């Protein structure tokens, strides 16, 4: 099950379309969906989580907590809508495109994809692009 929570004024329209897309990503990679919770928040909310749980004194666009077991994907994915908006402007892309990138980024982490090394970053970006394309394919 995928649930969406909002800790600010942001609202995700067409939640079913996003849930379907995320479920297809998980299935396409050979995993099963457990429980995913997306929490949309602002910079301060996510900064507090970053400090409390990771001891990182930085703003970030996403923090993912992994509760997966085997091939069943479960986790909490916190997304700063402010960071997504700023990143979209910085990269010259639309807000929705950047939101899709961040949303699938969290799921890819839950499936074991990393982005610490240069080759991992390249693979992650390719996977994100592939998954964003899946969003635009009607099922």
Image (spheres, grey):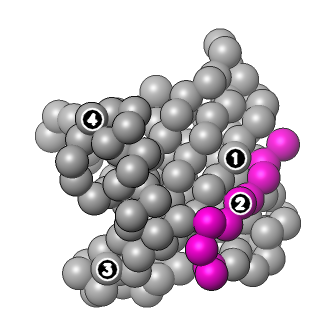
C-alpha gap between disc 1 and disc 4: 22 Å
Q: Position of residue 134 (x, y in %)?
A: 63, 62
Return the disc, 3 or 2, that comes first in the chain's sequence: 2
Dot 1: what SS? strand
Q: Which residue is mark 4?
A: 55
Q: Which residue is mark 3?
A: 86
Q: Nearer the viewer, residue 102 or 49?
A: 49
* Residues marked 2 and 1 touching at CB (< 8 Å): yes
Q: Which label number is shown at residue 5?
A: 2
Residue 66's place in the image compared with 64, above or below, is above
> What is the number of callouts on the image?
4
**Around disc 1, counting alpha carbons within 10 Å, would you say few (fewer than 14), some (14 to 19), or many (20 or more)?**
some
- Closer to the camera: disc 3 or disc 4? 4
Q: Position of residue 5 (x, y in %)?
A: 71, 60
Q: Residue at x 23, y 81 (%)?
A: 90
Return the disc, 3 or 4, that comes first in the chain's sequence: 4
- Closer to the camera: disc 3 or disc 2? 2
**Around disc 2, counting alpha carbons within 10 Å, would you say few (fewer than 14), some (14 to 19), or many (20 or more)?**
some
- Residue stretch in magenta: 1-10
**Around disc 4, counting alpha carbons within 10 Å, would you say few (fewer than 14), some (14 to 19), or many (20 or more)?**
few
Q: Which label number is shown at residue 37?
A: 1
C-alpha gap between disc 2 and disc 1: 7 Å
Q: Quadrant of residue 43?
A: bottom left
Q: Quadrant of the C terminus?
A: bottom right
């Amino acid at each position: 099950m995928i649930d969406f929570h909002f800790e600010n004024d942001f609202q995700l329209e067409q939640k079913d379309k996003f849930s379907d897309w995320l479920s297809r990503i998980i299935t396409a990679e050979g995993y099963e969906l457990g429980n995913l919770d997306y929490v949309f928040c602002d910079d301060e909310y996510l900064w507090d989580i970053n400090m409390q749980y990771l001891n990182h004194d930085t703003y970030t666009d996403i923090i993912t907590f992994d509760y997966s077991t085997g091939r069943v994907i479960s986790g909490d994915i916190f997304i700063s809508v402010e960071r997504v908006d700023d990143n979209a402007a910085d990269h010259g892309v639309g807000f929705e495109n950047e939101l899709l990138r961040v949303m699938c980024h969290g799921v890819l982490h839950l499936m074991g994809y990393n982005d610490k090394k240069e080759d991992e970053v390249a693979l992650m970006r390719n996977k994100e692009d592939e998954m964003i394309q899946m969003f635009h394919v009607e099922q």
